[in-house]
Amino acid sequence: MKVALANVAFGSVLLLSILAGARSAAAQSGSSGCDSGHCHSGPVRHHTVHYVRPVYGHVQYGHRGYGYDPAFGRAALIRAAATANVLNASARTQHLHADRLEMQNSVEFLATRLERKQINKQSRFGHLHARGEQVRQEKRAAVQLVSRSAPRRPVDPVTGQVHWPILLQSSYYEKARGPVDLVFHQRSVVGRINPDHFLPMRDWIERIEKELKANVAYYEKRDYLQAKAFLRSLIEEARIEITPAATQSQLAAR
């Protein structure tokens, strides 16, 4: 009986020791899991942890698992640069196209404006242009008629009348023609020009010549040259003495 009780007591002590060891192992396992950031309420299962490999230059450090490939980063950078180049080229092309369209629009606008200005000018001053063309035709006809006739002196020696060219017959030169006509009329009476009147007359002729030169843009070249040559011939004509008209009448009566 004593032996049986002793065996039972020994078995109980052994069972308690085994249970205490199991609890201690479980506590250590649970503490280790919580300390590492992984707390489990059930039995611990072994699993594979994947770590990312940091890249320093061309040397890789890390644990066993999936790592970062530097070639992938370079490829992404190249793709981004290529995309940026394509977008920049497209933007430059669109900008050039816009500049071309703007230039084309400005040219068309200028052409339309000039055409409209010409139309307005014709509508407002068309009758004046027609009248100017008619006057030019009449002047050309008069010049042709004069050229066909025999050449004559710039001043009629009998009457003293000055044969002004058509360009100098306008009212613009009327004030300057008066003194010249008067001097040559006196020459027809007395036979020569008074020396005191020669220099003032030459001044009036020079004034007419200056006015011709100032307005040369408004005259035809042929009319301008004819008027200029006529003014020079007037000065030469003033130096010539003639027989007075009264003397000629007396000679005719005899």
Image (cartoon, rainbow, N blue to C red):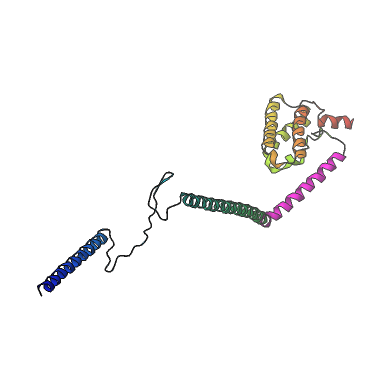
Q: Residue furthest top?
A: 195
Nearest the eye: 191 or 221: 221
Position in image of residue 138 (x %, y %): 79, 47
Q: Quadrant of the C terminus?
A: top right
Q: Is residue 190 above or below residue 148?
A: above
Q: Is residue 96 above or below residue 168?
A: below
Q: Is residue 138 left or right of residue 111?
A: right
Give the camera-side residue of 73 and 97: 73
What quarter of the picture does the N terminus occupy?
A: bottom left
**What is the magenta range?**
122-151
Q: Main secondary structure of the magenta part?
A: helix
Relative to 166, residue 110 above or below: below
Q: Nearer the viewer, residue 83 or 131?
A: 83
Q: Dividing the picture into quarters, in which one does residue 126 lie?
A: bottom right
- Position of residue 80 in the picture relative to residue 8 (left or right): right
Q: Residue at x 77, y 30 (%)?
A: 233
Quarter of the image where one finds residue 47:
bottom left
Seen from the viewer's position, the closer of residues 25 and 150 is 25
Q: Is residue 49 magenta?
A: no
- Residue 114 position, x and y percent, is 65, 53
